[in-house]
Amino acid sequence: MNGIENYIGFIVAGLLMNITPGADTVYIITRSVAQGKKAGIYSVLGIGSGAVIHVVFAALGLSVILAKSVIAFTVIKWAGAVYLIFLGVKTLLDKSGLFDNQKVDFEKVDLLKIYKQGFLTNLLNPKIAIFFLSLLPQFIKAEHTNNVLPFLILGCTFLLTGTIWCLFLVHAASFMTNRLRSNQKIGKVMKKISGYVFIGLGLQLLMKKN
């Protein structure tokens, strides 16, 4: 199939990767809980847009530069780590409760800002570029590794399964929020956990070696 082998195996591997918690998962759940379902959907769109860039780079072979260049990898790594830590600190310093949505006018939520943050969260994570670069070729026949099409097909497949999973997270988070909205203590605890997880992911990214 267009130079692809074991397509079903790739789908399974992609699903396992998608459901593994990471910065994207934390961002989506945080936005969905704090600012509603629409904010969660826009965060998914932003993250998906960042992933599209990674797929295109992998297809064109540009991710090889990131994988082999210590300087390029380090710059992206630090930018991504600093951004995650920034989101974490910002979350911890925000004094409003996680379930204070009664005070939020959902029509005035800055959806473009949420989209941009999701985009940067994904784009500035070099581990995603390395993931595509290391995983995709394993499911492409040797004689087709210089062909862009199989990379794009596999990449789009991963994006599709990932988007479906992320939208499920949005709906699940929104549903749970509606049930827990009256408990402000749980909201504060969840907010602190989200902030510390962002910071932890940022520090983990800093320790990532090329």
Image (cartoon, rainbow, N blue to C red):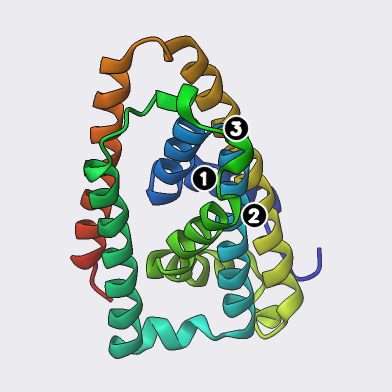
Can residue 144 be seen here? The reply is yes
**Amino acid type shown at disc 3:** Lys
Question: Is 21 placed above or below 64 here?
Answer: above
Q: Position of residue 96 (x, y in %)?
A: 31, 32
* Rendered image quadrant of residue 142: bottom right
Q: Name the residue located 65 percent from the left edge and 63 percent from the top edge.
A: 155
Residue highlighted by disc 3: 37
Counting from the top left corner in percent of width and height, residue 61 is at 57, 85
Q: CA distance from mark 1 to mark 2?
A: 9 Å
How many numbered marks have been drawn onto this rendered protein structure?
3
Residue at image point 69% right, 49% down? 160
Decide which of tag 3 and tag 2 comes sooner along the chain.
Answer: 3
Q: In this image, 147 relative to 24: left or right?
A: right
- Image quadrant of residue 205? bottom left
Residue where numbered disc 1 is placed: 18
Alpha carbon distance from label 3 to label 2? 20 Å
Q: Amino acid at mark 2?
A: Leu
User: Can you tell which of label 3 and label 1 is closer to the viewer?
Assistant: 3
Q: Which mark is residue 159?
A: 2
Residue count near mark 3 (Cα–Cα under 10 Å), binned few <14, some 14–19, many ≥20: many
The mark that comes first in sequence, 1 or 2, is 1
Mark 1 element type: helix
180 to the left or right of 136: left
